[in-house]
Image: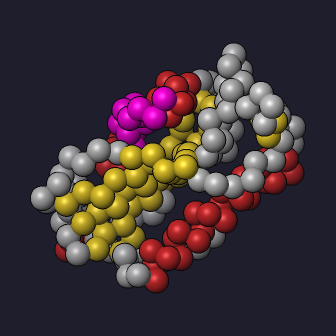
Amino acid sequence: MPYSKGVLAYALYLEMRKDGKTHQQIWLPPMADETNKELVSPRMVGRLVSEANPRRKWKYRPIETPLVGYNASNNTIDQIKDLDDAYDAITPLLEVVEHHVSNATRTEWAWTGSPLIVEVTKADLEAARVLGTPNALIRRINDARKDAGYPTALWDEGSADSVDIEF
């Protein structure tokens, strides 16, 4: 997937439902921009909403994975040069996501729609850097949810269809 102008990376959005609750997750890869090469480590931004708590805040959870090309002395990451470097860099994060998906499936969460891939911009990177809510990213996710036919109500337990996700 080639990057559009202004896009630094792509995030993975997953949504699952169980017992009248919806768990929304945004998986962010490690990122840095051209002007400030300081690394923002990979993380999951998530929230658990329900009819009782429809506007719960998004929370960041760090993802402890080894980072290919990471330079701890100045908190930067080397430029990815080719597809092999990209695969090596993202594989540890994908393994964490796969483990999480397996656990959620095993505990009978129902997947809502298919996973979504959403562009991450410099503004999203800066929000992630200070652990702020990435509002523009969430707006793009909401647009993608609508386009993908996701249910409008987040906590309507009866509207979630179970979807098999393979990695």
Question: Magenta residues, as a range?
Answer: 130-141
**Which of the two residues, 66 or 121, is positioned nearer the viewer here?**
66
In this rendering, the answer to whether 97 lies above or below 152 is: below
The percent position of residue 130, horizontal first and vertical second, equals 48, 29
Q: Quadrant of residue 41?
A: top right
In this rendering, the answer to whether 17 lies above or below 48 is: below
Residue 14 seen in render: yes
Q: How is the image coloured?
A: secondary structure
Q: Is residue 23 left or right of residue 62?
A: left
In this rendering, the answer to whether 10 lies above or below 114 is: above
Query: Can you say which quadrant of the picture contains the N terminus?
Result: top right
Residue 148 seen in render: no
Q: Farthest residue to the top: give it.
A: 35
The percent position of residue 99, horizontal first and vertical second, equals 59, 71
The percent position of residue 50, horizontal first and vertical second, equals 19, 60
Query: Can you say which quadrant of the picture contains the C terminus?
Result: bottom right
Q: Residue at x 37, y 56 (%)?
A: 24
Q: Is residue 4 left or right of residue 60?
A: right
Q: Residue at x 41, y 81 (%)?
A: 107
In this figure, what is the number of numbered marks?
0
Q: Residue at x 63, y 31 (%)?
A: 8
| 60 falls in the magenta region | no
Q: Is residue 69 left or right of residue 13?
A: right
